[in-house]
Image (cartoon, grey):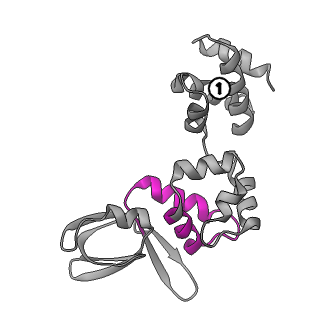
Amino acid sequence: MIAHINGILEITSSDRAVIDVGGIGYELHIPASTLDALPATGIHVRLHTHLHVREDALVLYGFSTTGELEFFRLLIGISRIGPNVALNILSGISFDDFRSAIYSEDIQRLSSLSGVGAKTAKRLVLELKDKIGRVEYMERMDSGYAPDLANSAIAGMISLGYTRSVAETAVRMALQSESSDNIGELIKAALKNV
């Protein structure tokens, strides 16, 4: 597998970039966020990559950050979400906004993305709600709490066998009623909420 490409940026378009590596031009399909992060042509660039194998082609996708790459891989892991729809999602919404839409079950926002209809939006919510960490989303909703304490309490509940979504909801409720900064007390309070 090709993990990344280092070379000279030769050509860019709205959804592609060509990088020259030792005289060979590699065409990479890229989201708008990566396009915005690219330097001017003729400048050295490094992109993280995902190689997608189809019956009729090998297609290389490029990303400016590992976070974008992981977001892409998370999306293509969903049934009936192919690489092109995943790129449309990456181009149309930031990860934080996407995570917020998933947890608030904002089907209208998700279905407004290119290539995503109402059924696909519902599938995204159903399949991703437990897979995407929501501590940062919780922090926006409940400002003033220590993220390390919440993360530790969530991890503790997960180790006890609870799902991430159950653990996050329970910890969030506990943080609203408890003012303790002791992890043990927070987990005890959270367990009362399940």
As for residue 69 lying within the magenta part, the answer is: yes
As for residue 24 lying within the magenta part, the answer is: no
Chain part drawn in magenta: 62-91
Tell me what residue is drawn at x 59 percent, y 38 percent: 137
- Occupied quadrant, residue 19: bottom left
Left of 9 or right of it: where is 120? right
Amino acid on which the number 1 mark rests in the picture: Gly
Secondary element at tag 1:
helix
- Occupied quadrant, residue 3: bottom left
Q: Is residue 99 above or below residue 74?
A: above
Tell me what residue is drawn at x 55 percent, y 89 percent: 56
Name the residue that disc number 1 marks: 156
Residue 155: x %, y % from top left: 62, 30
Tell me what residue is drawn at x 36 percent, y 78 percent: 13
Q: Quadrant of the N terminus?
A: bottom left
Tell me what residue is drawn at x 53 percent, y 56 percent: 71
Q: Is residue 53 above or below residue 129?
A: below
Residue 116: x %, y % from top left: 66, 69
Residue 72: x %, y % from top left: 53, 62
Main SS type for the magenta part?
Answer: helix
Left of 12 or right of it: where is 50? right
Q: How many marks?
A: 1
